[in-house]
Image (spheres, rainbow, N blue to C red):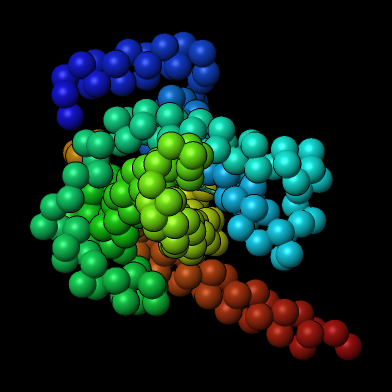
Amino acid sequence: MSSSAEQFDRKARGEFARLGRTRVYRGELLRHPVYTRFLHWSVAIFFILSLLTGFAIYSPWLYRWLTPLFGGGPRTRALHPWFGVVFEVFFLFQFINWFAPMVWNEADRRWLRRMKEYVTNEDRVEPEEVGFFNGGQKLYFWAIAVTAVLFLITGLLMWFDDVVPRWSVAVSYVVHDLAALVMLGGLIIHIYEGTAHQPGTFRSMIDGTVTEKWAWTHHPAWYRAVTGRDPREVYEREKRRQAERERAVENWEREQDARERVADDRVP
Ligand code: HEM
């Protein structure tokens, strides 16, 4: 990433930090600053608007009910490329913003090999080498980056179909639609991962923070980098504390039962 792009990104982070606020309480860590959240939700809104208008154009027979949302069929068709262009612009800024933590490395290759354990929740904590983003998140990011380029090229060819060869327009239809289907699949998985599969993740895109427990569970190497503490040690300590709590509750329940039995015996 060129240093002028990095400089721009640093400046934008600073400006947005003045516009919005992120409160980090004890036991929490800052995950996504205001600028990142702004970019993420701008990308998400314009991506979904592009997807909805795209579906209405792709299959009016199935999705005609969507067009009144955008002012009718012709307006839906006219708006779609503009939603797409705005998505591309925001994604470009997001690409710059997330380029550094999204660089692929050996740990990500290993993460992909053990994806089954991740999906089935076999391990309670992620391997210690998992950093700010895991291999699956990086894969999603790079898939968006590749499809964004495909959307842009094929979209422009279809938009200006009167000045480009007919075969290029025909190929563009197929590529554009396939890319949209891949992205739809990716988005469904992404929303599931960011909400139900990993509780505590969604708030990072709302108030910008996560709990320390979330951090050492899902991104141990990032936890170590920002706190300087050993995630495995914290996990073991938490496990011992949990076991002690369970033992204390069991003892309390046993004592309570014994007290109730004595009280019952005294009843004439
Ligand atoms: C509309 C529902 C959406 C929800 C609930 C959602 C939620 C989230 C959350 C919570 C994160 C932070 C994950 C973390 O810090 O580990 C995230 C990251 C991300 N989001 Fe979304 N998002 C949505 C839509 C989108 C859309 C439409 C796109 C792009 C087309 C997108 C692209 C990304 C990317 C690239 C990341 C970073 C990598 C990752 O965590 O997978 N998101 N999202």
Give residue 257's quadrant in the image: bottom right
In the rendering, at what x and y percent does residue 107 appear? 15, 58
- Please give the name of the residue rendered at 20% of the width and 72% of the height, measured from the top-left corner: 113
- Please give the name of the residue rendered at 43% of the width and 51% of the height, measured from the top-left corner: 166
Vertical arrangement, residue 66 with respect to residue 44, above or below: below
| In-image side of 173 versus 67 (left or right) | left
Give residue 13's quadrant in the image: top left
- Between 60 and 21, which is closer to the camera in this rendering? 60
In the rendering, at what x and y percent does residue 117 appear? 31, 75
For the question of whether residue 179 can be seen, the reply is no
- Please give the name of the residue rendered at 43% of the width and 25% of the height, measured from the top-left corner: 35
Vertical arrangement, residue 124 with respect to residue 221, above or below: below
Q: Quadrant of the N terminus?
A: top left
- Between 162 and 31, which is closer to the camera in this rendering? 162
| In-image side of 48 versus 237 (left or right) | right
| In-image side of 135 versus 48 (left or right) | left
In the rendering, at what x and y percent does residue 202 appear? 52, 47
In the rendering, at what x and y percent does residue 92 appear? 36, 32
Vertical arrangement, residue 263 with respect to residue 188, above or below: below
Q: Quadrant of the C terminus?
A: bottom right
For the question of whether residue 195 can be seen, the reply is yes
Give residue 170's quadrant in the image: bottom left
- Kindly give the residue lying farthest to the right in the view shown: 268
